[in-house]
Amino acid sequence: MILEVAILDVKADQQKEFEISFGNAQSIISSMHGYINHQLQKCIEKENRYILLVNWERLEDHTEGFRKSPEYQEWKARLHHFYDPFPEVEHYELVEL
């Protein structure tokens, strides 16, 4: 399993609109092959910051399957205009101890 982590800084005074748009757009990502689950959490210290955590079966399910899909274009149209700066996305895997 791969964890996608994106810190989302939303433009000032657009948090409510972002949350509504994200609520409507989350069905896009959840319908993708390899998707497991996701969480959107709001930062307590910075009111316009969110973190998006998405679990994927494989890295390629996100980087190839989702990002190169027509569904991603819809996701992008609904959400990307809220971000400033554009978020950096990283991927993590569990350390087996």
Image (cartoon, grey):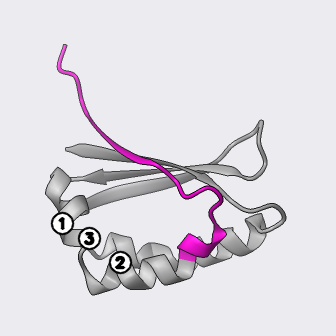
- Residue position marked by numbered label 3 in the rendering: 66
Q: Amino acid at mark 3?
A: Phe
Is residue 88 magenta-colored?
Answer: yes
Q: Which residues are magenta?
A: 79-97
Task: Examine the rendered structure and indicate whether residue 91 appears above or below residue 12.
Answer: above
- Residue position marked by numbered label 1 in the rendering: 64
Spatial distance from mark 3 to mark 2, Cα to Cα? Answer: 6 Å
Q: Residue at x 65, y 59 (%)?
A: 84
Report the number of numbered marks.
3
Residue located farthest toward the top when viewing the structure as drawn: 97
* Residue 85 in the image, given as x and y percentages of width and height: 62, 55
Q: Residues within 10 Å of mark 3 (few under 14, many from 20)?
A: many
* Residue 32 in the image, given as x and y percentages of width and height: 25, 73
* Residue 19 in the image, given as x and y percentages of width and height: 66, 68
- Residue position marked by numbered label 2 in the rendering: 72
Task: Examine the rendered structure and indicate whether residue 38 appears above or below residue 77.
Answer: above
Task: Examine the rendered structure and indicate whether residue 19 appears above or below residue 3.
Answer: below
Residue 61 visible, this angle: yes
Q: Amino acid at mark 1?
A: Glu
Front residue (pair 88, 93): 88
Quarter location, residue 82 = bottom right
Residue 89, label in figure: none
Spatial distance from mark 1 to mark 2, Cα to Cα? Answer: 11 Å
Q: Secondary structure at mark 1?
A: helix
Q: Secondary structure at mark 2?
A: helix
Badges 3 and 1: C-beta atoms under 8 Å apart?
A: yes
